[in-house]
Image (tube, rainbow, N blue to C red):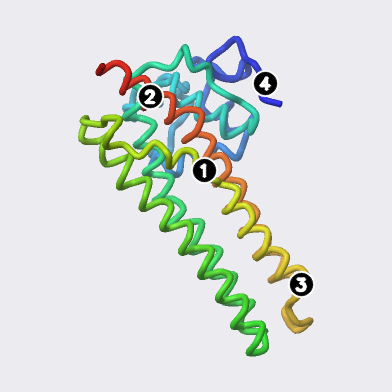
Amino acid sequence: MNKRHTSPYLATFSPDMKLFELVEMSPSLLSILSRLDVRLPFGDISVKDLCEREGIADELFLILCSMHTDDSFRPDVEALKPEMLAGVVRYLRLSHRYYAEHMLPHTSAHLERILDHCDKLSHSVLRRFYDDYTTYIEHHFEQEERFIFDLVDGGGIERDKADCSLFDMPHTDIDDRSNDIASLIFKSLPEAAPTKLRCAMLEHIYALRDDLRRHSNVEEYLLKPLVEKHINAKR
């Protein structure tokens, strides 16, 4: 069940808290700093100071941190400000780049190590499953970039141009494909494929799956209502 919050972000977060305290509280937030290209070192500055330095609205930054930390967190739609739209799109674009340049290559590198220990049939099956999986993800990103993000960046997003149905696409397809690959690695590869390599690959597949779930939550519960607010404001 989705949690209700009286604050626009988690009560444990605050613009006045030190950035190190935020990361210490939830180390997974390091990936947000990475995809936002936050410059290190950041010393003993506060979240608010960092956001001012990086040109990020602190309220939006903490909403994103809340959604990343707590999968059940849902921002208060009424509290969302139209000017957040560009910042959310920027974050999602940078997330696409983070997946393409960081998460997918790391997963692929582990795949290649496993394939070196597979017989011809297992090699072919695993390669096909993984290639289909990454192609599906890349196509989904391309559709979002073309039919949503590009229009928002141009400032001319309209109901008859923005394909808002993309928000309603079944992201469970990505989950299913992730789980199919995980099942194949866990159950079906020959014993010659070392357990350590399998576990490393599984860790990356599950990490990517979970991050993509959070990504889709940002699209559905943050980007979508902001786009709808933008469209309604132009009527």
* Residue beneath disc 3: 195
Label 3, secondary structure: give it.
Answer: helix
Asked whether, in this view, residue 166 is left or right of residue 110, the answer is left
* Residue beneath disc 2: 228
Q: Relative to 120, is 51 above or below?
A: above
Q: Relative to 1, is 148 above or below?
A: below
Mark 4 or 2: the one toward you: 2
Q: Residue at x 55, y 46 (%)?
A: 170
Residue 25, percent from left and from top: 64, 29
Within 10 Å of disc 3 (Cα), the crowding (few <14, some 14-19, many 20+) is few
Quadrant holding the N terminus? top right
Label 1, secondary structure: give it.
Answer: helix
Q: Which residue is at the front of the view, 218 or 104?
A: 218
Q: Please tell me in which quadrant of the rendered image residue 90 appears.
A: top left
Whichever of labels 2 and 1 marks the residue nearer the N terminus, that label is 1
Whichever of labels 4 and 3 marks the residue nearer the N terminus, that label is 4
Q: Residue at x 52, y 22 (%)?
A: 18
Mark 2 or 1: the one toward you: 2
Give the alpha-carbon distance from disc 4 to disc 3, as whole Å: 38 Å
Which mark is on residue 31? 1
Give the alpha-carbon distance from disc 3 to disc 1, as whole Å: 27 Å
Q: Decide if residue 87 is in sight here.
A: yes
Whichever of labels 3 and 1 marks the residue nearer the N terminus, that label is 1
